[in-house]
Image: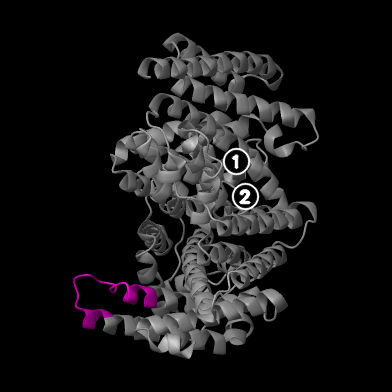
Amino acid sequence: MRSVLSRMPGWEALWYLGALYLLGRLLHYYLTGIGGALKLAVELVPLVYALAILKLLMEGGFYRRLSPWANNLLGGVYLGIVAFSYFYFNREYQSLFLLRSGAFTSLDYVVAALFLGVVLEVARRMHPILVVINLVFALYAVLGPWVPWDPLWHPGISWKRLLSVTTLELQLGMFGDYAQLGLTLIGAFLLLAALGAGFDLQPSLVRTLLAFLKRARHLPQLTVLASMFTGMITGSAAANSAVVGSVTIPLMQRVGIRGQYAAAIEAAASTGGLIMPPLMAAAAFLMAQFMGVSYGEVLLRGFVVALPYYATIALSVYLISLREVRGLLDKDKTLPRPQIDDFLKVGLLFLAVTYLLYLLVVQGANPLLAALQAAGLGMVGFLFWGLLRRFSFSELLSRFREALKTYTDLLTQIVVLMTLLSIFVSLSTATGFILRMGQALTATAQGDPIALVFVAWLLGLLLGLGLPPTATYVILAVIIVDPLRQAGFSAWQAHFFSFLLGVYGDLTPPVALSVAVASAIAGSNFLRTNLEAVRISLPLLLFPFVVLIRPELLDAPWTSPGFWLAFFSALVAFLSFAVAFYARSSLLLRFLVAGLAGGILLAPISAALPLALVAFLLGGYQVWKSNLYLQFRREKEG
């Protein structure tokens, strides 16, 4: 290890040393729990920001217009502030937490101001809009008495109080619950994803699925399956698009699928990974904490949403393939051929994920310990695979080094996001904004639940235009959940409404990262690709309203007839919309199927079943007609 580090540039070697310490400290906490989550956050949040600074310096510095020397100097200053904050907060931990809480010293405020400034400057490179929102809320907190609109007026807080609630009050500010959750529970779940990246699991998954490919028109389904399975362990739509799309999009284009369709299919499938358990874009952990329920309960309801979504995408993709595919595939010459290693690695992934879900759903195990056990099973399996391959020690070290790099990068992104959300929630609480905004929403809706839902939907759509899904969900959860519950909706309905709105925001420009990545790979127009991805992902647009209209989906037990009736009626409605968009049939029939689909979702649950049966038969007929069209086209061409 010393020889490896000695060959690295200075910043990179320092980054790897910090990453090793971060992983070791987290594993120590996961296994022992010594010190508690708050002490862990006070210790590791500064370290995570130090790693983020080093990463920026390795990639060229903070400011492109400055010389490398100036960037290194500023980076060194930022590192010095973070290092001093690390030692100060840990040395003064007991005093800050217990002895002088609410009576902080001048030095406390100076350190807090310096550290908060560096945090916002580093986070600006990752989440600029969220940083701007926090700065606006900081001004709102201080300038409350000058707010002209009465519902949002408040007496204001001092700058010292602002530093206190965001930094010095350890259990409330950036070291609070969200940062602790990112380092503990989410960090444990990221271990398996990092191992997969270190051992090139995603390309193996694509090659393995290709082994079962029989016909050219089935090729786009590879994107759906690969993105779904990748989303289970990564929880990132953009990364999903980049890894899976780099293989599947060119293959789809080879068989005649136009670039905008190929990219839209990949973007829609990758976005679905954000609602796929067990990660669910990290929102599942936050939802369990908000609601005070077990993580397994959130996972079960996540599957209720994810399975109809992917079923609808699969049908849409199948119908698109019937229309678009023109070429043939020679499997021996044009497709990557899977090796036995690919099957072994994918088998290890499924074993680890299945074991994880068994522990969470069946056994009801502690999520952190379950994730740690699943990651341990995966590591043992990959080590055994490496021994079978007779890897040298340097080869194994190289793979674990890649896993460490991936893990640290993923965790850094999560912790930076969580600290920004902590700052936002702390400022919102200190100013009473959450209560005032809830009252304003209720007053705007004037007691009408439909108007309240519409206003909440508009707010979620606006937030989704510039924020990542997890941030959108948290902001919506603290603002609109209580008004929705007061309007008669359950906690499950309100939280999933907020969560699904946040995920849908990932498909809306300008933050449609999965679309941007996929369209860049395909060489297609971004806006046209985005529009097509929205059409394919229609269930994601409708599902926030469906969970409000059909409370049985989330509140009824799985054994009740009401749940299954609501589930299958929603599934048929979504599939019918896919048929209406992409089937080869008359415009009248497609409008009729779309009308039936809308009726299924809006009608009382007792009337949904007959409508669903009619829509299922009519939609099935149109799929059959589309297949006949394909056969006719083939006969005409050949």
Q: Is residue 583 magenta?
A: no
The residue sitting at 56% across, 20% down in the picture is 597
Three-letter amino acid code of the residue under disc 1:
Ala
Residue 568 in percent (x, y) is at: 67, 27
462 vs 451: above or below = below
Kindly indicate whether the residue at mark 2 contacts the one at mark 1 (C-beta within 8 angstroms): yes
Question: Badge 1 is on which residue?
Answer: 306
Residue 133 visible within the image:
yes
Residue 402 in percent (x, y) is at: 48, 71
Query: What crowding class fits label 2: few (fewer than 14 Cα within 10 Å), some (14-19), or many (20 or more)?
Result: many
The residue sitting at 62% across, 35% down in the picture is 547
Residue 125 as seen in the image, left or right of residue 220 = left
Mark number for residue 277? Answer: 2
Provide the residue span drawn in magenta: 53-71
The residue sitting at 62% across, 86% down in the picture is 94
Residue 636 in percent (x, y) is at: 37, 15
